[in-house]
Image (spheres, grey):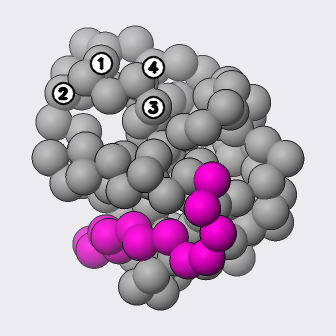
Amino acid sequence: MRAAAVLLVLLALAGCGGTVQVEPPVPEGEAVAACDKLATLLPQTVGGDERGTSTPESPYVAVWGSGAVALRCGVPRPARMAPTDTLQEIGGVGWFPDPDRPALFTAVTGVAYVEVTVGGEHVAAEVLSDLSKPIGQLAPQAG
C-alpha cells in the first residue's frame, strides 16, 4: 500500500511548487547497481516537465514538474503482477499497468523494478516513452 500513499502525496502536491515528498525504495542485490546507473541516465525533461527535487533525497527517486511524474527504482515486484500477465511494451521496455491504481506503472527490466507514477494532465504513454530509453539500458545484455 506504500505505492498508494506515494500516489496520494504526488497527486496532492501536483501543481504546487517546491520539493515533493516521495518515500525512497531500498533496492537489493543487483538492483542497487542498476538503479545507481539509471540515476545517471535519466532525462532532465519528461512529458514537458523539468526535473524537480524530492525529499528525502535519494538516488533511487526522481520527480519531474511538481511531482506530476515520479520514478522509484528498486521497488519490490508488484504484488498484483502474475507470471502470466502481458506487459505493455513501450520503447523496448515491458511495463506493468497496476489494475488498482491507473496512474501507476512498473517497468520490468530483469535486474530491477522501476515504478513510475503519472499524474496531472500527462499522457502515460508519452511519459513512459520518455523513460523507456534510459530504463531499457538496464536490461541484461544477451551474449
Residue that mark 2 sits on? 80
Q: Quadrant of residue 18?
A: bottom right
Please, what secondary structure does the residue beneath circle 4 have? loop
Q: Give the Cα separation between the discs numbered 3 and 4.
A: 15 Å
Residue visible at 69% across and 47% down in the picture: 131
Secondary structure of the residue carrying tag 1 is loop
Q: CA distance from mark 4 to mark 1?
A: 12 Å
Q: Position of residue 85 (x, y in %)?
A: 31, 14
Marks 2 and 3, how far apart at CA: 15 Å
Mark 3 lies on residue: 103
Q: Which residue is mark 4?
A: 87
The vertical placement of 26 against 48, above or below, is: below
Nearer to us of marks 2 and 3 is 3
- On screen, residue 55 versus residue 42, left or right, reads left
Indicate the quadrant where residue 86 lies: top left
Query: Does 39 lie within the magenta span?
Result: no
Q: Which residue range is magenta in the image? A: 15-31
